[in-house]
Amino acid sequence: MNDCIFCKISKGEIPADIVYEDEKVIAFNDLQAQAPTHVLVIPKKHIASLNDIEEDDLELISYIFDRIPKLASKLGIKKSGYRVVNNCGSDGGQSVNHIHFHLLGGRSLQWPPG
Ligand code: AMP
């Protein structure tokens, strides 16, 4: 998607504080961190939201979830614990229409979310 900010980050067209990248996935620090560690993990492929995952994307989504604990380990939060959040749609609080998984940690997180 030409006007998608996360597609632009994944293509290197706009800067981000990248903490991990491979051919399928990129992870970068959230601009408005809500925890000491707050990283967004996204597929480079444009998928608008959780609602838009298709059969062909399932391997990619599995791949992301395989990467997340490894990334948590690299970021030093695997043992202490962390939260993975996907906001979907307007009531879910999704503000960027490119699927992304928030990886939050580095402090004790509250529950339930607001
Ligand atoms: P959501 O509200 O779940 O759609 O999350 C979108 C997240 O993207 C928010 O936490 C924003 O702070 C974050 N964000 C938006 N633009 C950027 C950017 N250019 N670099 C890093 N994080 C961003």
Image: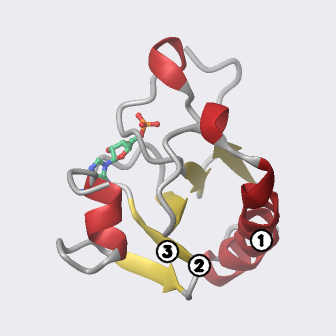
Q: Which SS class for mark 3? A: strand
Query: Closest to the observer: 28 or 90?
Result: 90
Q: Are marks 2 and 3 in contact (CB under 8 Å)?
A: no
Rendered location of residue 22, percent (x, y)? 56, 88
Q: Residue at x 75, y 79 (%)?
A: 70
Which of the numbered marks, if any, corresponds to residue 26?
3
Identify residue type, mark 3: Ile
Q: Which SS class for mark 1? A: helix
Q: Are marks 1 and 2 in contact (CB under 8 Å)?
A: yes
Identify residue type, mark 2: Lys
Vertical comparison of 7 with 95: above or below:
below
Which of the numbered marks, if any, corresponds to residue 72?
none
| Label 1 crowd bin: few (<14), some (14–19), many (20+), radius 10 Å | some
Query: Closest to the observer: 26 or 30?
Result: 26
Residue that label 1 marks: 63
Which of the numbered marks, if any, corresponds to residue 24?
2
Q: Residue at x 56, y 87 (%)?
A: 23
Identify residue type, mark 1: Tyr
